[in-house]
């Protein structure tokens, strides 16, 4: 964090920030945000309630660590290219597993994750101490403009105005959105209608002139031990699972669209 303190901007007054005594991030106007003992910084300027709790993030980590999204991580690494010293921001990073797997252990890239849910960032800082973790609101983010080579937005709401502000010239926004077949085995248990990402894709294309899209669809056999974590991590099942109901899922479908926009 000290090495890359130049990426930070005060979310209160927008002035530059410095790391002071490895304890706080302090701006020129003396607005101070303490570095938690776990190593993350909470940059929120107002209380925020999140529907995502510790149980959800623990389940999410189990599922992602199982390799379910390994083809997605490999594809994103391929899209990012061979350049080593990239600054990569994961927006809506949750417990950080996607970003950690994408960067890998040998990457020289600098990883930064931000999420409004403190429980997610607590988990991220516990497991991945080689990445900078921030609790923060994208509508009022703690980063200077043009700080990042790549912004990731994986299965999370977008803030295109902020993405453009944070990206360097010629930087990449990589947004991952679900397609109609994503986790369809779970969706079909609880919903009749099919999902469409058409409006999400249209909004992305409106914001970026240079757009590439990649489709990633596959089925994977599902270990029984992963069923409950998978059900707990997705909002599809909130308030819909009976505690004593046994659920069988022999396989699960991953059906994603990767949208890549380059900042002009």
Image: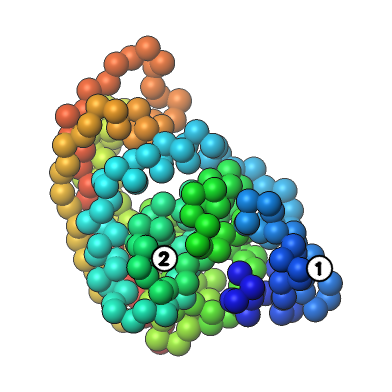
Quick one: SS at disc 2?
Answer: strand
With respect to residue 178, does 203 lie above or below? below
120 to the left or right of 33:
left
Q: Position of residue 4 (x, y in %)?
A: 59, 76
Give the residue at mark 2. Answer: 152
Is residue 223 in sight in this rendering?
A: yes
Q: Which mark is residue 31?
A: 1
**Residue at position x 34%, y 45% in the image:** 65
**Residue at position x 37%, y 39% in the image:** 62
**Residue at position x 25%, y 27% in the image:** 224
Q: Outermost residue, top direction?
A: 244
* Camera-side residue of 245 and 31: 31
211 to the left or right of 16:
left
Is residue 206 in sight in this rendering?
A: no
**Residue at position x 34%, y 41% in the image:** 63
Q: Position of residue 153 (x, y in %)?
A: 42, 62
Which of disc 2 and disc 1 is earlier in sequence?
1
Specify the quadrant of the image occupied by residue 245: top left
Q: Position of residue 27 (x, y in %)?
A: 77, 74
Mark 1–mark 2 distance (CA, rounded to whole Å): 28 Å
Q: Outermost residue, right direction?
A: 30
């Amino acid at each position: 964090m000290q090495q890359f303190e130049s990426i930070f901007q005060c979310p209160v007054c927008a002035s530059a920030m410095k790391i002071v005594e490895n304890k706080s991030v302090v701006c020129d106007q003396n607005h101070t945000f303490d570095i938690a003992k776990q190593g993350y910084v909470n940059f929120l300027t107002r209380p925020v309630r999140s529907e995502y709790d510790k149980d959800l993030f623990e389940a999410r980590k189990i599922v992602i660590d199982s390799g379910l999204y390994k083809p997605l991580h490999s594809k994103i690494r391929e899209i990012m290219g061979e350049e080593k010293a990239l600054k990569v921001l994961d927006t809506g990073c949750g417990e950080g597993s996607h970003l950690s797997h994408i960067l890998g252990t040998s990457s020289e890239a600098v990883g930064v994750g931000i999420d409004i849910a403190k429980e997610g960032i607590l988990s991220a800082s516990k497991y991945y101490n080689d990445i900078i973790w921030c609790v923060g609101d994208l509508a009022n983010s703690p980063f200077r403009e043009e700080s990042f080579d790549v912004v990731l937005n994986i299965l999370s709401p977008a803030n295109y105005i902020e993405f453009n502000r944070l990206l360097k010239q010629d930087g990449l926004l990589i947004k991952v959105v679900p397609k109609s077949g994503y986790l369809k085995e779970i969706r079909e248990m609880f919903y009749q209608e099919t999902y469409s990402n058409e409006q999400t894709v249209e909004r992305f294309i409106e914001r970026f002139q240079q757009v590439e899209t990649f489709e990633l669809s596959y089925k994977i056999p599902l270990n029984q031990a992963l069923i409950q974590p998978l059900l707990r991590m997705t909002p599809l099942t909130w308030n819909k699972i009976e505690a004593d109901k046994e659920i069988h899922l022999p396989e699960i479908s991953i059906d994603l669209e990767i949208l890549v926009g380059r900042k002009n």
